[in-house]
Image (cartoon, rainbow, N blue to C red):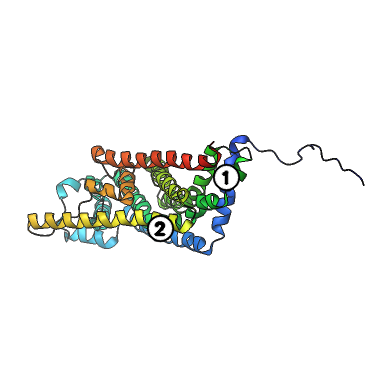
Amino acid sequence: MPIHDVGYRPWSGKLTAPWTRWWKITEAGVAAALKSRWVRRALLASWIPAVYLASVFFFFEQAMEKPDQEVIDQIHIGAIRDIDWDEVGNQSTAEIARYIRTREVLNRMESLPNSKSVLAAAEEGDPRVMRNRVWSWLLSMFLRYPQGIMTLLIVGLIVPPLIARDVRSRAFLLYYSRPITRIEYLLGKMAIPAVILSLITLVPALGLYIFGLLLSPDLSVIADTWDLPFRAILATGVCVIPVCLLSLLFSSLTQESRFAGFAWFAVWLLGVVVWGVIYGQNQLQLAYAAGGAVPPTFDSQWSLVSIYSTIGRVQSWLFGLETDVASVVPSIVVLALICVISFVWLYRRVSAPVRI
């Protein structure tokens, strides 16, 4: 009976850098997540608000650059009276018409959150400042509202089984038998939802910014809005990092992914409901004290009970819409605590199988 050589053989495969080991976990996780029909549908649906917002960019730029002839005619016959002619008297008719048209567009934002700075920029009459503020406001609303809801859904679909499945199958032993450290394991798992969430937040936000540049009359607009891509990256990180760490923490605490999914939806939705009740009560008290309806206020520190509202407040500050730094500091502290506590607990959980 022949005896075959079972000794060591040279490796003929492709070698990769050691610092990219965690990316293999991410690649496999993203590919597995995209096999789900529901995940693909959610990704497709998450781009619909971006298409709608692109039309808002279009109409705003049209109002900025091509004043309506009807408005110009009304200026000539003196039909427009609710305007400070002393303030705009030195401007041309086209510039005055542009100011009126953009003011009509912005006045519709009065009842929406964080619109005060946008309206203040409109009153200044500087088109460069107005464009920066309006683009910031549109990107902030895009990341906070439609994409915030889609973040809740997509994280609930893909994150719960990521670590819970490894806890149930004891896959840690397989991971750690390879040159994978616990930090690399966590980084690879965390990057799975981070990559998918970036596809519904950062990528369309940057796409909207580029679309706005294409609609603009010249490249000087870049000098007015160069900071917005960096603000969008920071705002995406403020959402993605705590969300990924917290959801992975829930996944590590159980062997059943459905329990982790329930915990994620319960914490997120319960916080929104509690904040909504407190906010509604606060508005009723203000209306009663004022003897009538009052403009909506969104600056109560009770919003800290909601992770969604806490992230939204920090994002608004990053886009320059929240000017009171002192009111944003508690939200930053809360998000930092969520990240630190979640990471420390996660590290302990994934270290348990190899702890002696």
Give the vertical position of 17 relative to 206 (above or below): above
Image position of 56 (left or right of 164): left
SS at badge 2: helix
User: Where, by quadrant of the figure, is residue 49 drawn?
Assistant: bottom left
Q: Earlier in the sequence, mark 1 or mark 2?
A: 1
Q: Position of residue 117 (x, y in %)?
A: 25, 46
Neighbor class of circle 1 (other Cα within 10 Å; few <14, some 14-19, many 20+) is some
Q: Position of residue 209 (x, y in %)?
A: 42, 49
Look at mark 2 in the image and give the residue it sits on: 262
The circle drawn on residue 172 is: 1
Residue nearer the viewer, 195 or 234? 195
Give the vertical position of 210 relative to 262 (above or below): above
Q: Position of residue 80 (x, y in %)?
A: 17, 59
Q: Which quadrant does the C terminus fall into?
A: top right
Neighbor class of circle 2 (other Cα within 10 Å; few <14, some 14-19, many 20+) is few
The answer to the question of whether label 1 and label 2 lie on touching residues, with beta carbons closer than 8 A, is no
Q: Amino acid at mark 2?
A: Phe
Residue 106 seen by the camera = no
